[in-house]
Amino acid sequence: MKAIWLENQQLQLRTDAPIPEPQPGEALVRVVCAGICNTDLELLKGYYPYTGILGHEFVGIVEQGSEELIGQRVVGEINAACGECRFCVTGQPTHCENRSVLGIVNRNGAFAEYLTLPIKNLHLVPESITTEKATFTEPLAAALEIQQQVQVRPDDRVLVVGDGKLGQLVAQTLALTGCDLLVVGRHQEKLANLAKRGIKTNFVEAVTERAYDLSVECTGNPEGFAIALRALRPRGTLVLKSTYSGQLTFDASSLVVDEITLIGSRCGSFPPALNLLATGQVDVEPLIQARYPLGEGLAAFDHAQKRGVLKVLLEMPT
């Protein structure tokens, strides 16, 4: 089968990748559409020493697995947990000590014609959601995870730093809480997407220091982290939604003196994300900037790495 393969920080289009064999309890999924995200780009830069097929945001059709899923359109949670470790038995499978992660850790990913995942990881896509929109389920779930970790109240002043793919989704989900929200970035056209939805936006230079209860860093670069930290009032909360390919340095003393809470935030639950897509409470259509067939996957990655580009989708052969 065709697949986008990463090895030694180099991409190649393979045409000889074997179709994966599902293990007991797993399904074989024919991939229909997959999205390139910042984590894929960070893996390409060496954020984590991964070798294999990239990709974890996908929509596919189940070809082998439980009978009720065969032939159905699905999305899939990316962490394949063991079910036995201390995190699994306490209901925290995303931190399973023995997990594999689709397209990231010890499991080939979605930039291929087929993938495998545990059946329990799969979720049916409602008919009201188009395949392209459903491709955003995984990053939208990750955006919603913030609200599982932090209580966001209507009277909270909240800052989102970053107007890219993830920042757009984080902003739209936080806006649903009714908080006093500001999104800052460097791209007028991206900020305009949010302004159309009634969300306050501005350029990063407009951020008032020590003025926010909660800040969310979505840029993946040290400057974004510094802005998000400076914006917090004492006892504020800083949520990190980005991965960093390099080392991040900062003044740790400021965290102590101002008693700042620092929270890492990663994967989230799929059903709430699917509900937001089905009900139109979040609009992902403006985030799609390009579509490429899998055979042009290397060109798709070149496009996705250009400054200011939002979502690039890979469409698989039927």
Image (cartoon, helix red, strand yellow):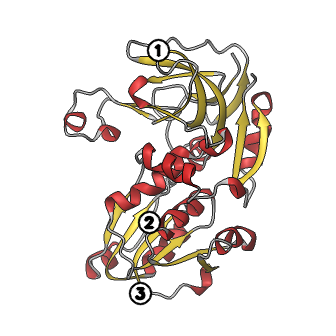
| Badge 2: residue crowd in 10 Å (few <14, some 14–19, many ≥20) | few
Q: Quadrant of the C terminus?
A: top right
Q: Amino acid at mark 2?
A: Thr
CA–CA distance between discs 2 and 1?
A: 51 Å
In the rendered structure, find residue 147 and report the number of the disc placed on it.
Answer: none
Q: Nearer the viewer, residue 162 or 281?
A: 281
Q: Looking at the picture, how far across and down is residue 304, in whole percent?
A: 72, 48
Q: Quadrant of residue 72?
A: top right
Helix, strand or loop at mark 2 = loop
Q: Mark 2, mark 1: which one is toward the viewer?
A: 1
Residue visible at 69% across and 13% down in the picture: 16
The residue to which callout 1 is attached is 67
CA–CA distance between discs 3 and 1?
A: 55 Å
Q: Amino acid at mark 3?
A: Arg
Of the image marks 3 and 2, the number of the one nearer the N terminus: 3
The residue to which callout 3 is attached is 210
Q: Nearer the viewer, residue 34 or 252?
A: 34
Residue visible at 41% across and 48% down in the picture: 268
Residue visible at 63% across and 26% down in the picture: 31
Of the image marks 2 and 1, the number of the one nearer the N terminus: 1
Q: Mark 3, mark 2: which one is toward the viewer?
A: 3
Q: Quadrant of the N terminus?
A: top right
Asked if residue 54 shows in the view, the reply is no
Q: Mark 3, mark 1: which one is toward the viewer?
A: 1
| Badge 1: residue crowd in 10 Å (few <14, some 14–19, many ≥20) | few
Helix, strand or loop at mark 1 = loop
Q: Amino acid at mark 1?
A: Glu
Determine whether label 3 and label 1 are within 8 Å by CB: no
In the rendered structure, find residue 249 and report the number of the disc placed on it.
Answer: 2
